[in-house]
Image (cartoon, grey):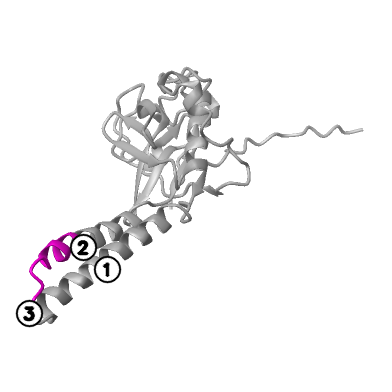
Amino acid sequence: MAVKKKTRQAVARELVERRFLPRGSQTGVVAFVVGAIGAGALGAGVWGRFIADPPFQHALYLLVPGAAVLAGSLVWGSDIGPVRVGDAGVAMEANAEVVRIPWCDIDRLRIVGRNLVVGGTSITITIPLGPHAQAAAWILAEAQRRVPSVVDVKGSVAELLPKPSESAGESRKIDDLQVAGRHCVRSDQLIAFEGDARLCPNCAAVYHKSHVPDRCAKCEAKLGARALPVPTT
């Protein structure tokens, strides 16, 4: 009787993240109210300066601030983009671009005022807690699991955030990660093509496929065959 041997094929795990849209019920409403006040002041200033006969003496005191408040509300109301949290780190979408900080590049994670500040080696991402409470909760939870040494958030402050909800955000595959131009953490070899890169599944440290260590040099997580390939398009 022939015995069939089962062969196991290693299936590479995909890089995934959650994408959170900002809550419009807070920032959007406030921006609308502020914008309405600015528009009213601007309209009154235009009427008093250019339409009223004789012109209103103090119309400029309404015209200039009204225009500034209206412009500021438009920027404020549209400046907060989606936030992503997952295997590749923390990212924020802004003006059709994605600004991303891998977990291994985060120096300090803290709450300042009503913002979660993700400080990186070269860039910093500031995430407002109002429209992005769930995203902030997920970032804090993931950071405590992946890179706990960078978390500088007191327990009393962390309790102000909601618990990360599995139903919050949209779970999605990461297909726009760019690591070409970075250097291998172990060998310092330049990563010329995404296909040559391998990522630590815990902290997203980048290695050349020929120099993947048994343990990550950044977070000391087990690596080797667990290193993830970077998706290429």
Quarter-wise, where is residue 41 in the image? bottom left
Furthest residue toward right? 1
Counting residues from the N terminus, which is met first, the one under dot 3 or under dot 2? Answer: 3
Mark 3 or 2, which is nearer the eye?
Answer: 3
On screen, residue 54 above or below 101: below
**Point 77% across, 34% down: residue:** 6
Q: Residue at x 33, y 54 (%)?
A: 79
Magenta region: 55-65
The residue type indicated by label 1 comes to Gly
| Closer to us: 189 or 221 | 221
Q: x, y (%) of residue 59? A: 12, 68
The image position of residue 61, as x and y in percent, is: 13, 61
Q: Amino acid at mark 3?
A: Pro
Q: Are marks 3 and 1 in contact (CB under 8 Å)?
A: no
Question: In this figure, which residue is indicated by the disc labeled 2?
Answer: 66
Which of disc 1 and disc 3 is earlier in sequence?
Answer: 1
Q: Is residue 4 left or right of residue 44?
A: right
Q: Which residue is pictured at 36% across the width and 44% down the height? A: 178
Find disc 1 in the rendering and name its residue: 40
What type is the residue that disc 2 sits on?
Answer: Gly
